[in-house]
Image (cartoon, coloured by chain):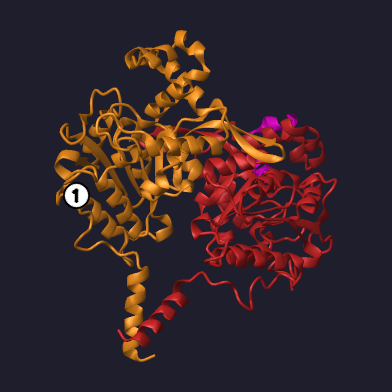
Chain colours: A red, B orange
Amino acid sequence: MTRHALAATQLACWLATAPLAYAAGELPSWNDGQAKQAITAFVAKVTKPGTPDFVPVAARIAVFDNDGTLWAEQPLYFQFLFAIDRIKALSSEHPEWKDQEPFASLLRGDLKATLAGGEHALMEVMAVTHSNLTTEEFEGIVKNWLATAKHPKTGRPYTQMAYQPMLELLAYLRANGFKTFIVSGGGIEFMRAFAEKTYGVPPEQVIGSSGKTKFELRDGKPVLVKLPEINFIDDKTGKPIGINEHIGRRPIAAFGNSDGDLQMLQWTAAGPDARFCLYVHHTDAEREWAYDHPSHIGQLDKGLDEAAAKGWTVASMKDDWKRIFRFEK
Amino acid sequence: MTRHALAATQLACWLATAPLAYAAGELPSWNDGQAKQAITAFVAKVTKPGTPDFVPVAARIAVFDNDGTLWAEQPLYFQFLFAIDRIKALSSEHPEWKDQEPFASLLRGDLKATLAGGEHALMEVMAVTHSNLTTEEFEGIVKNWLATAKHPKTGRPYTQMAYQPMLELLAYLRANGFKTFIVSGGGIEFMRAFAEKTYGVPPEQVIGSSGKTKFELRDGKPVLVKLPEINFIDDKTGKPIGINEHIGRRPIAAFGNSDGDLQMLQWTAAGPDARFCLYVHHTDAEREWAYDHPSHIGQLDKGLDEAAAKGWTVASMKDDWKRIFRFEK
């Protein structure tokens, strides 16, 4: 091969295979503010070979909370709305629920009374709706719900409640050689039912809360049965524990929206080299919701203080995002 | 670019990036027997686009047991030999161990008496040697041990006790677009200390047994402390449970060597499409060890029967492997 042809080959290969930093069109739904600048500056820094901050591809691990960070979480966690729909669907097989809390209030549509039952009531609703099924049956039920259920405020399928700027951010990081993981308090099997299609995150990169399962042979065919027993709660201090258990190395970038993500951001930030931590701040009552402290869901209080003290990036949905949902005009 | 240069470019790119099926030199340490033929036929089948058995890259998940499948496990699991060395190293800080079982026998070098203490004794040795350390401290201790300790029979570092044919098989599968995972009864953090360097398997693709950890802030710096409490045992029915928890989809190929791997092979084989299951059979007393049933370690009994009944591949180390360890002449 001539020297010229070789150079052409190298260029063509590079164009075909290099994880290109997005040029002009990068992160199109982000305004050109401080948050976007901080993101692109960090990515430029860790992907430039031969510099002290360069991070090899294998170590480019980025972790994302799900509820309130990648998709909305109001008026209630979507997985809890799924559980409510499931209680309604199962109620004909359970006539006794009409007189039994927390199901009775829930079937009357009195969510406040259900939630008044506290953690115990929530756990009972989750246990009844998320167990005594094989893992395959559960996946089918979740996928069917996602294909048919509509968000109470927008009337859109729940997967359309994903944040467009965050979808772009996931793609942008992957285009720059990052492996993107979800690390969420949400159910690991619930999220896996849509994470690959909605976020481009494969099941093995989804970490979440889980129930115990039991291996059984049914007519010689092995199945895993979901038990009404907690295995792991992937929230607060559980997030670094889950990251250690599933990933086994420290992320270099972490994205969250609440105090439940604080320990994940702390764990990420404590690494020796360049790190990036970002809080999504719900500041847009018109296009989404505005809440931080206090809030019945996704409370962000200590996290905001720590972000200010440590120089983490805070992205304001109102100011930093051109649009929030893809379906917006 | 001329047409000729374009073709050259395409060829060069293809050579640089395509997951090539190994041609002439594929699996050089495997004899041309039934086992090698079964492996290459399966890989050819699932990687050929447009055929009914084609599997897209994302679903090409292969799972490997570690002890006795990827590296040796005699005279005792290497992790237990690590624990023994660690007890010796810690004994000066624990004068009381001289009169306290199971440590007393172990320090006298009487392994039989230690093992006579049964599961309880083993658990105590593991708890003492694997906890009250941060995850980072533990990783450093394991890496230091691997760099210095020698196998009692061969005098080689333990990582040289990896099976050369299996290292080739891991590389061959990855070259054909497979994602290779370890699913082992061994400790997840113990294996992660060498899996990337020895096997090319990154930490996030290592699944194993684990202890609980606790998140703490020490002088404002977050650490994870290993507790003397079992979190998960990744053996027998635990293997499909661990696969479901960590990978979230069913493997299409599984490799093991003992009855502890049987449920993992059953779970893999039960998928709807083309599947591949292989048992490594320890048949070579001269170059390695010969054992199946009965055995104090790595017993293979029910697994051999089921392999015969279901047509799984059994690779005989004596007949199918040209060489077992890389250091052999």
In the depicted view, which residue is nearer to us: A45 or A231? Answer: A45
Instruction: Tell me if residue A99 is in the magenta stretch.
Output: yes
Looking at the rendering, which quadrant does residue A188 occupy? Answer: top right
Is A27 positioned to the left or the right of A112 in the image?
left
Q: Residue at x 58, y 34 (%)?
A: B134
User: Quick one: which residue is furthest to the bottom in this view?
Assistant: B2
The chain that hosts pointer 1 is: B
Instruction: Tell me if residue A235 is in the magenta stretch.
Output: no
**Residue B87 showing in the rendered view:** yes
Q: Is residue B232 above or below residue A178?
A: above
Residue A11: image location, x then y, percent: 44, 80
Q: Quadrant of the N terminus of chain B?
A: bottom left
Looking at the rendering, which quadrant does residue B71 occupy? Answer: top left
Q: Number of numbered discs present?
A: 1
Dot 1: within a 10 Å radius of its alpha carbon, few (fewer than 14), some, or many (20 or more) residues?
A: many
In the depicted view, which residue is nearer to us: A117 or B314? Answer: B314
Residue B154: image location, x then y, percent: 24, 34
Is A197 positioned to the left or the right of B24 in the image?
right
Helix, strand or loop for disc 1: loop
Looking at the rendering, which quadrant does residue A222 occupy? Answer: top left
In the depicted view, which residue is nearer to us: A153 or B161? Answer: B161
Disc 1 residue type? Trp
Question: Over which residues does the magenta segment extend?
Answer: A83-101
**Residue A219 showing in the rendered view:** no
Q: From the image, tell me which residue sits under label 1.
A: B30
Q: Main secondary structure of the magenta part?
A: helix
Q: Residue at x 50, y 13 (%)?
A: B95
Q: Quadrant of the C terminus of chain B?
A: top left
Residue A94: image location, x then y, percent: 64, 33
Q: Residue at x 43, y 16 (%)?
A: B121
